């Protein structure tokens, strides 16, 4: 889905649901909810791939040994999928940090994130500060994506 469509849809959602029913204005909470909505699909894909690689006999063994479903999840499933969860979290953080369009539509008055600040700085002219921040942001994002890829590849045992 194009980001502009998601941004406008979330703006309508927040104005039609958050404001009248919950009494919340556009602000930091709407940005957080919008970014969770935007990033949850990426995390779900990464974690789902990790879950598909698990053997069901592990969970049957935990049940045979008397573990409750919560204990099975906490002591067996979560440690096995933890690298994928961390990789998904790093990927969603990098995507969320770089996103401007969704933040622009859902920020409201007085909320200033890094992409919004950079955009407001380049309205007049591109200064050396903008170039430096953009370079650091690009290097930081690239390093997070590489780290997430390595964590996920290590979790799969080099099968990707």
Image: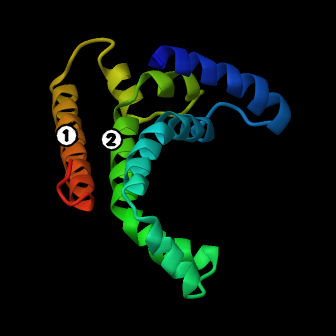
* Residue at screen point 57% across, 27% down: 106
Q: Is residue 68 left or right of residue 77?
A: right
* Residue at screen point 19% across, 46% down: 146
Q: Position of residue 92 (x, y in %)?
A: 39, 43
Q: Distance between the residues labelled 1 and 2?
A: 8 Å
As displayed, is residue 114 above or below residue 127?
below
Q: In this view, does 106 lie to the left or right of 81?
A: right
Q: Position of residue 122 (x, y in %)?
A: 29, 17
Q: Is residue 41 left or right of residue 29?
A: left
* Residue at screen point 43% across, 35% down: 113
Towards the viewer: 134 or 42:
42
As displayed, is residue 17 above or below residue 94?
above
Q: Total number of numbered labels?
A: 2
Secondary element under disc 1, as helix, strand or loop, is: helix
Query: Which of the 4 quarters of the picture holds residue 85?
Result: bottom left
Name the residue that disc number 2 marks: 94
Q: Is residue 123 left or right of residue 143?
A: right
- Sequence-first disc among 1 and 2: 2
Name the residue that disc number 1 marks: 142
Question: Could you classify mark 2 by the number of other residues whose Cα lies within 10 Å: few (under 14), some (14-19), or many (20 or more)?
Answer: many
Query: Which of the 4 quarters of the picture holds residue 131?
Result: top left
Question: Could you classify mark 1 by the number of other residues whose Cα lies within 10 Å: few (under 14), some (14-19), or many (20 or more)?
Answer: some
Tell me the colour scheme of the image.
rainbow
Q: Where is residue 134 in the image (x, y as percent from the top left)?
A: 21, 30
Which numbered marker is on residue 11? none
């Amino acid at each position: 889905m194009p980001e502009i469509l998601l941004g406008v849809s979330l703006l309508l959602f927040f104005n039609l649901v958050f404001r009248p029913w919950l009494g919340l204005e556009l602000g930091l909470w709407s940005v957080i909810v919008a970014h969770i909505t935007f990033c949850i699909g990426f995390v779900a894909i990464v974690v789902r791939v990790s879950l598909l690689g698990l053997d069901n006999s592990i969970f049957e063994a935990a049940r045979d040994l008397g573990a409750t479903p919560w204990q099975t999840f906490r002591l067996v499933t979560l440690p096995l999928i933890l690298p994928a969860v961390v990789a998904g979290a790093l990927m969603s953080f990098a995507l969320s940090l770089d996103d401007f369009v969704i933040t622009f539509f859902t920020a409201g008055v007085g909320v200033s994130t890094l992409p919004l600040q950079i955009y407001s700085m380049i309205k007049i002219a591109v200064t050396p500060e903008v170039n430096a921040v953009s370079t650091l942001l690009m290097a930081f994002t690239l390093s997070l994506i590489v780290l997430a890829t390595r964590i996920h590849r290590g979790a799969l045992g080099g099968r990707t």
